[in-house]
Image (cartoon, grey):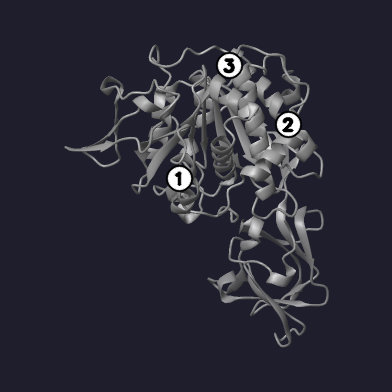
Amino acid sequence: MIGVRLTYLHRARGSFGCWKINEDESMKVPSQRPGRFALITLALLVGSVGCQGGGSPRVPIGPQPAPAQPPTAEFSDLHDQSRLPGLEDRRFDQDSYWRVVEPVVTGSDLFRVNVVGESAEGRLLRTISFGEGPASVFLWSQMHGDESTASMALADLYALVAQQPNHPVIQAILEGATVHTLPMLNPDGAQRFQRRNAQGIDINRDARALSTPEGRTLKAVRDLIDPDFGFNLHDQGIGTRVGSSDRGAAIALLSPPFDASREVNDVRQRAMEVMGVMIRAMEPMVGGHISAYGDTFNPRAFGDLITQWGTSTILIESGGWAQDPQKQYLRKVNFVALLAALESIARGSYHGVPMDLYLNLPSNGRRVADLLIVGGTLVVPGLQPYKTDLLVNYTRPLLEEGGTFAEVGDLAETEALDTLSLDGLFVHPAESALDRWNGIQIRVGADAVFTVTRNQDGSDPVWTFDGGPPANLRKRR
Ligand SMILES: [Zn+2]
């Protein structure tokens, strides 16, 4: 057996002097390679567990009255001050992310960085922790590789902690909470900007089977920390509406159920109270665009099982926002919500915040399609030209790229985020959009690649739609 030892990369010095490596607290986690074990030293990660003596005595802050309204404008200003450059494009790989974050978290004594596992392709999974207060919090982001909004917000949060440790809010968090983060849990998926990991598995359906090294790492870290609060940070489809309204869901929240009964126990109550704080913080920024994610119990999902395991868990799904193709505004909204949540947890001020703030949120509503194309005449070889509507959904909707045909026919009642009118024009599908099997036909599911022309014979082309409109026609978000 080859022993692989992964140790911390950096540890706190200075005022928080009670961290020490304790071999007894080392943990063996089987790796995905047979016969190979990753010995992961997590004593530093658990930090305050067993931290008695040696450190300065800690005075619990205790419950404080809930603020009527978190200072959204001030938190938004703090984000302007701490937003890290280098993450302007929401598609970034682990190396790019680490290049931005590493100087911040290894340049300050306030952070503890630990390697806690490896992805299926061997990329390191790291936790970044700060604070040493009694309330333990664990936040993990991007278990779906193409859902990067919260990873950006966490980077900005590290920057704020590093730059303004004496700000009263940061001071309260550092003294009242121990915050562990695992940004970009799925670096192999992020490398390809896809949902699943390199094994082709959706990590958020692997909480029970634990077939993925990323899922095993998440569970191992959770079990070791046994956090009071967990934050499961995702992005959802940008076409999701709030309830039955026409408003897009910028943020959806969920207190995942611990079983099919969907009962509210004290674990979930605490999550709902904290979400009340977050809703108040976000309302001035995205009021009317906050919804509740579906609460059907899923025995394979991490949020549900982590709730079952006793952690008050909060799911945040970042959706869409107009004129925000790179989700930079939603990055700020995430930052503000997380800062408000961490402060309230550190101060205990979430106690008594009405659960109704969460319970009265409209549910995630229907999901509208991406693009409706109306008025054109389709020209398919071997068939008479015919007028029809076309529906396109994008693989990368924010960028209007990677479109495939979702429907062909009369789509007059179909809702889409955008409509393209081709009155009097002809649509000539490319080869890749056609099936040649017992004849030629346009195929639902095929790449939406076609040329728009003024003439039926294909002459006088106007423009080509290559999985998405030409640049001058891209207007959304
Ligand atoms: Zn997700």
Indicate the amino acid at tag 1.
Answer: Glu
Tag of residue 345: none
Mark closer to the chain start, 1 or 2: 1
**Image spot of residue 12 (x, y percent):** 41, 30
Q: Mark 2 points at which residue?
A: 281
In the image, residue 22 sits, relative to residue 283, either above or below, namely above
What residue lies at 50% left-to-right and 31% top-to-bottom?
Answer: 302
Circle 3 residue: 267
**Mark 3 or 1, nearer chain start:** 1
For residue 81, side relative to residue 229 (left or right): right
Q: What residue type is labelled 3?
A: Val
Q: Which of marks 3 and 2 is nearer the N terminus?
A: 3
Label 3: how many Cα within 10 Å (few below 14, some 14–19, many 20+): many
- Residue drawn at x 71%, y 40% is 77
Q: Mark 1 points at which residue?
A: 102
Residue closest to the eye, 126 or 424: 126
